[in-house]
Amino acid sequence: MSAAVVSLERTFHALGDPTRLGMVERLSRGPASVTELAAPLTMALPSVLKHLKVLEEGGVVRSEKAGRVRTYRLQPDALAAIDRWVAQRRDAWNACFDRLDRMLAEEDEES
Amino acid sequence: MSAAVVSLERTFHALGDPTRLGMVERLSRGPASVTELAAPLTMALPSVLKHLKVLEEGGVVRSEKAGRVRTYRLQPDALAAIDRWVAQRRDAWNACFDRLDRMLAEEDEES
């Protein structure tokens, strides 16, 4: 699943959990197998796989299977999508302040 | 609650829902009352308030009560925190590629 077709709330949902955020921290240092990702965790393998599935559905990671080993890596597109969203929200927010500034300036001129 | 003491997974969790993401879109155009935020939605008021609570706990919005009207506004600190996190992940990711590049260059020199 490409990050382009993943809705942003799924990406945010994927990141909205300490375990999954920890997995992303780990993967931002390089690709890792399921075994490597599970190693620091105290949960059962099915739970680990469930978290990885949510991350993959959110477009945050992708995985490839070679032989019996499935390797996960970060999907930089997801970071780019979050970046764009934050920038857009900030632009809208700044535009709102600009309108307020203009209104106050006009009030000053009138008084 | 200031965004500085809110953990990032709570911020991401707050944004990981289409209704809440819609509320943030609305608030990025300026502050709004509960009534205004509820207007485009087809859900009951308690559900609206629950979503707003999650957004507030995630440090994404803050609210102020004046008389009987509670007004919500975006908390830009949350956007800044997400920005920093994305930048850090990207730096780690790039550092990983740099290491790979160096390794490949060294292999080239050896061969």
Image (spheres, coloured by chain):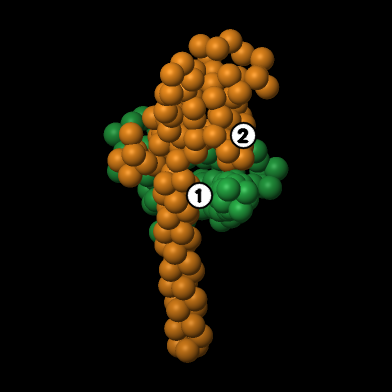
Chain colours: A orange, B green
| Residue positioned 39% across, 51% down in the render | B26
Q: Residues within 10 Å of mark 1 (few under 14, many from 20)?
A: many
Residue identified by numbered label 1: B72
Q: Position of residue B64 (x, y in %)?
A: 57, 49
Furthest toward the front, the residue is B111
Res. A26 mark: 2
Badge 2 element? helix
* Pair 1/2: label in front: 2
Q: Position of residue B22 (x, y in %)?
A: 37, 44
Q: Position of residue B47 (x, y in %)?
A: 42, 29
Q: Is residue B15 above or below residue B91?
A: above
Q: Amino acid at mark 1?
A: Tyr
Quarter the N terminus of chain A occupies? top left
Q: Dividing the picture into quarters, in which one does residue B38 lie?
A: top left
B93 or A96, nearer to the observer: B93
Q: Is residue B110 left or right of residue A111?
A: right
Q: Is residue A73 above or below residue B27?
A: above
Q: Amino acid at mark 2?
A: Arg
Check if mark 1 and mark 2 are on a common chain: no
| Residue positioned 54% across, 18% down in the render | A48
| Residue positioned 42% across, 46% down in the render | A77
> Dot 2 falls on which chain?
A
Can I make out residue B52 in this image? no
Q: Dividing the picture into quarters, in which one does residue A84 lie?
A: bottom left
A84 or A98, nearer to the observer: A84
Q: Position of residue A59 (x, y in %)?
A: 40, 36
Q: How many marks?
A: 2
